[in-house]
Amino acid sequence: MSVAAKIHIILEKASWIRKMFEEGAQLKEKHGVENVFDFSLGNPNLEPPARFKEVLIDVANASGARHHSYMPNTGYASVRQAVAEVISKEQGVAITADEVIMTCGAAGALNVIFKTILDPGDEVITPTPYFVEYGFYVDNHGGALKTVPSRSDFALDPQAIRSAITSRTKAVLINSPNNPSGQVYSKESLVELGTLLQEEGRRLERTIYLISDEPYRKILFDGIQVPALFSCYPESIIATSYSKDLSVPGERIGFLAVNPKARYREDLLAGMALANRILGFVNAPALMQRVIESLQGVSVDMAIYQAKRDLLCDGLSKCGYEFVKPKGAFYLFPKSPIADDVKFVRALQEELILTVPGRGFGCPGFFRIAFCVDDDTITRALPGFERVLKRF
C-alpha cells in the first residue's frame, strides 16, 4: 500500500460534503454549470466588502522594514491587540493581546488547541449534528471524538453531555451558529453546561475545557445574538475565522482566544504557540494579518443571507418539507421524507440538485442545503425539490 493504513481508511470514508461536491463537478461538466443547482458546499457567494480590497491594496503597496520577515508564532502584536479589543466587547471580559493567537483559519486553531491539550486516548464530546472534520482533527492528536444527541430542535442538551463524560473526557466542542442546523445555543444552556463541567471537573479532579468553534458568529438572523462564552465558564477557548463574515475562506485567516480566567492560562498559551509552529502552520499569513487588523467590525451584509434563508424556507415550506428555521449560518437542515437520507439525496441529484446527507454530520434522516448561492439558483431549484418530495 502506498499510503498509511489510517489514511487509506479515511479516504474510503471520504467526507460526504466533498463527495457530493466532486459528483456535482461531473454533473456540471455533463449538463452545464447553469443547469446544476449546487447546495453542497458552504462556500460564501458574496463578494468581500469593498473595504477589504481597499485595505488589501494599501497593505500590498506599503513599504517598510521586515514586512515579509519571520514573526512571533502567535502573530503580530498589533493585530492581536486589535482582535483582543473586539473580543473584549463581545465577551464582556477584558482580553489582552497575550490571550490571542492568530491562526490559519478556524481549522488551524482547532488543531493547535487539540495538539496542546490532548493526551492519547483523551475524549472530546460534541453534540450532533456536527461538522465532520471534527473527528479527523481530534484523531490527528491521539484523541477520540464522542458524539451526543441534541434536542429535537437541535438545541444544546447539557444533560446528554453530562451523561457522556468519563475519566478520559478532556473537552467539549460546540459550534454555534451550528453547521449544519443553523441553531444558536442559548445563554441558559451554556451557563448550565459551564456549571456541570465545573462539577464534573471537580469530581474527576481534571480540567474539562469548553471549546467553541465560531466561524459563523456574525451570520445571524432576526436580531439573535451569540451569547458570550467566556462569562459562562472559565475553562473556555474560542476558535474562529474571517472566512464567512468577510467572504475570504481561501485566505485561511483566523484566531484562537483563551479565557483569561483559565486556571492554566500560561501553560495553554505557551503550548499553543509551540503547537502553531510544530504543526507546520508556524504563523498565520503576514499579509492577511495586516489586512484584517484594519477590518475589525467589517463584514458582508448579513441581511442578504437572511433574505436567501427566507426565500428557501418559504419555498420548501410550501412544498411540504419539515425543518427548523435556522437562526444563523447559511445552512438549512430539513428532515428527509424517508429514513434513508442518502437515497433521498440521490433522488435530488436526478433533478440536478446537490445537497449533503445528514449522516455526513452524524445525523441520519436529514439533509443539508447550503444556501450561500445566487437567489436564482434557489428559485429555479424549488420545482425539483417539490417533484422529488412528491415521489416519496
Image: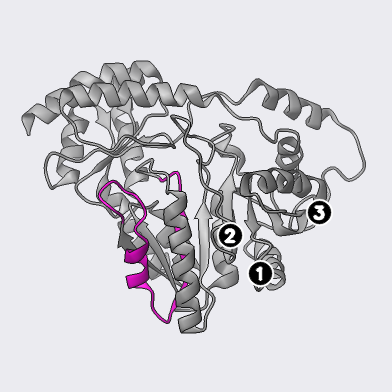
Q: Secondary structure at mark 1?
A: helix
Visible in this render: residue 1? no
Residue at coordinates 41% horizontally, 34% vertically from top-left? 330
Quadrant of image for the C terminus: top left
> Which of the 4 image quadrants contains residue 184?
top left
Please report whichever mark, 3 or 1, sits nearer to the chain's N-terminal start: 3
What's the magenta region?
A: 150-178
Q: Is residue 345 magenta?
A: no
* C-beta proximity under 8 Å, tags 1 and 2: yes
Q: Secondary structure at mark 3?
A: loop
The amino acid type of the residue labelled 1 equals Leu
The amino acid type of the residue labelled 3 equals Met
Q: Nearer the viewer, mark 2 or mark 3?
A: 2
Q: Secondary structure at mark 2?
A: strand
Q: What residue is pinned by disc 2?
A: 237
Visible in this render: residue 360? yes
Please report whichever mark, 2 or 3, sits nearer to the chain's N-terminal start: 3
Quadrant of image for the N terminus: bottom left
In the displayed structure, does residue 103 sit left or right of residue 75?
A: left
In the displayed structure, does residue 73 sit left or right of residue 178?
A: right
Residue 158 at x, y percent in the picture: 37, 62
Q: What residue is pinned by disc 3?
A: 71
C-alpha separation, residue under disc 1 versus residue under disc 2: 10 Å
C-alpha separation, residue under disc 2 versus residue under disc 3: 23 Å
> Which of the 4 image quadrants contains residue 332?
top left
User: As displayed, is residue 176 above or below residue 313?
Assistant: below
Q: What residue is pinned by disc 1?
A: 268
Q: Is residue 164 magenta?
A: yes
Residue 326 at x, y percent in the picture: 36, 36
Q: Which mark is residue 128?
A: none
Residue 51 at x, y percent in the picture: 69, 23
Residue 163 at x, y percent in the picture: 32, 72
